Image (spheres, rainbow, N blue to C red):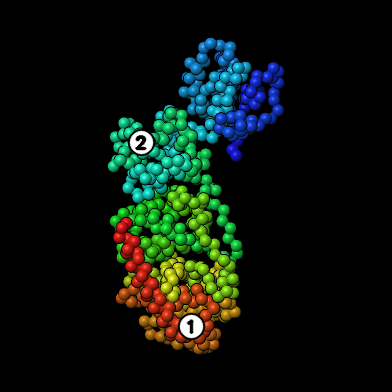
Amino acid sequence: MESVNALIFTSLIMTLVSEEFPAVVPYRAEEITIPADVTPERVPTHIANVICIVYSVNNKNYLCSPFTVCVCFRVPLILVGNKSDLVEHSSMETVLPIMNKYTEIETCVECSAKNLKNISELFYYAQKAVLHPTGPLYCPEKKEMRSACVRALTRIFKVSDLDNDGILNDHELTFFQRTCFNTPLAPQALEDVKNVVRKNLTDGVRDNGLTLKGFLFLHTLFIQRGRHETTWAVLRRFGYDDDLELHQDYLFPLLKIPPDCTTELNHNAYLFLQSVFDKHDKDRDCALSPEELMDLFDVFPYVPWGLDVNSTVCTNDQGWITYQGYLSQWTLTTYLDVQRCLEYLGYLGYSIIAEQESQASAITVTRDKKLDLKKKQTQRNVFRGHAFGITGSGKTGFLQGFLGRNLVKAIKEEHKSYYAISTAHVYGQEKYLLLHEIFPDFDFLSETELSCDIVCLIYDVSNPCSFEYCARIFKQYFMDSKTPCMLIAAKSDLPETKQQYCMTPLEFCRKHKMPPPQSYTCNTAAAPSKDIFIKLTTMAVYPHITHADLKSSTFWLRASVGATVCAMLGFAMYRALLRPR
């Protein structure tokens, strides 16, 4: 429970606690925690996040000396005119010029410890000054909200604008009200709110919905009328702290990940991300243009995706991220850096819109891989493949081929990515395959570089020195591991050259019970074949399959037919879902 600190006169504290004026008032009381049940806010009060400057209303000269010192503390101040029982007039005329001069002063209260007048109210305002301070929200000199408050409320508006049409309609306003205050707005109350905005702002209401200007005006009105606790309730519900920054506990909820386990998005998370995509895909072309992508990232404090994202996931002919590429990028972030994924979901308001406790509910932590191997089955949907090969062996082309790109669609060096992620269908199930191009430093491979579900050993058929590196990598690091490996004969459109190694690639595969070398080229007129990626994904999903299975054409035929049928059904279902959007 939050506590509020106050520096006040002993008589006021003792009167509040005992509910009677003490006959003998000590010069200084011991440290006291005022119990919650004697204050209106039901918050225990401790001792100097807020300072109550107490003066005697029958001695106005006393106000000046402590005030000039206290104003330097830069904390909320409450002016308290005590002993109001001794005078018949108010001291407010003297106090108002001081309140106008110093913005640190939240309010002024006149009270009497002797006859218990306004004692409870005094502590209410002291607590309110800390729990719901005006200073971070509003600039009294300019009579407008501070820029940090405007930024925060603008993000809240955009998150709450579920259809991204620039207004909060009745459904969105009702959801917003229920989210922040646990109670819906009655239809008449909704109209009353909009009428208040209409009377004061020409463009505050449009198409019977609240615009951003109208939304900001309402909160300015709340603050000006002393109801800033309403604005604070909204800000805190959407994750903001007292400095109007998103709280670390909100952005990074606790998520325990045991060793050898991976992280994936669950079904509810994908549904939420699909709704975010639909919200910003205004032209309904199943891709996000640069403008639409920037609109999506408008609720972020920075642009989260770099230029390399376009060479990491699938894009359309214009180079825009497709729906599949968008989900793939989210899947990659979740797998490689789940804390970053939690942060991103926080900016998008996942816990609010999906009505979940936190972003952690969007994540599935998979079980230990060793248990999957033991049981010969897995519930995982994301599998990691590492591509090894010397410089120029064709690794980059191989990764880009996975995304449907041939050599014609060259990637600029500054846009280059060492990752590629997309989907492949294995026996009718859609799985994500994440390929990572490993830098060819044979002498130093980290544990992360060696930890994967499938190894791609890529050599250039036209380079006689290319295969030896693959053979050495396999024998040094993977020969005794349980990680399945596949040899890729890249650039197969070029004349094949004899490799300078003690045995041919085919002989090497037979000796080590690997599938035969798989020919591959991305030097094609159309998109490169994806058959090899289905094989890789199948081997990653079923690492226990035997060498005989891998050589069987029936095995691969079953996998390929399953993938084709699933792809056709998936496309038909997506088109059906797309129609009513």
SS for dot 2: helix
Q: Position of residue 141 (x, y in %)?
A: 43, 28
Q: Is residue 88 placed above or below 182 in the rendered structure?
A: above
Residue underneath mark 1: 550
Instruction: Say which quadrant the N terminus sits in.
Output: top right
Q: Observer-nearest residue: 11 or 412?
A: 11
Of the two numbered discs 1 and 2 in the rendering, the one whose residue sits closer to the viewer: 2
Q: Observer-nearest residue: 242 or 449?
A: 242
Q: Position of residue 115 (x, y in %)?
A: 60, 17
Q: Amino acid at mark 1?
A: Leu
Q: Residue at x 32, y 64 (%)?
A: 575
- Is 48 on the left-hand or right-hand side of 324? right
Instruction: Say which quadrant the C terminus sits in.
Output: bottom left
Q: Residues within 10 Å of mark 1 (few under 14, many from 20)?
A: some
Q: Residue at x 49, y 51 (%)?
A: 356
Q: Position of residue 75 (x, y in %)?
A: 55, 31
Q: Is residue 326 placed above or below 430 in the rendered structure?
A: above
What is the C-alpha distance between the residues marked 1 and 2? 69 Å
Q: Residues within 10 Å of mark 2 (few under 14, many from 20)?
A: few
Count of numbered labels shown in the rendering: 2
Q: Amino acid at mark 2?
A: Gln
Residue 170 image label: none
Q: Position of residue 516 (x, y in %)?
A: 47, 85
SS for dot 1: helix
Residue 252 showing in the rendered view: yes
Residue underneath mark 2: 188
Residue 53 showing in the rendered view: no
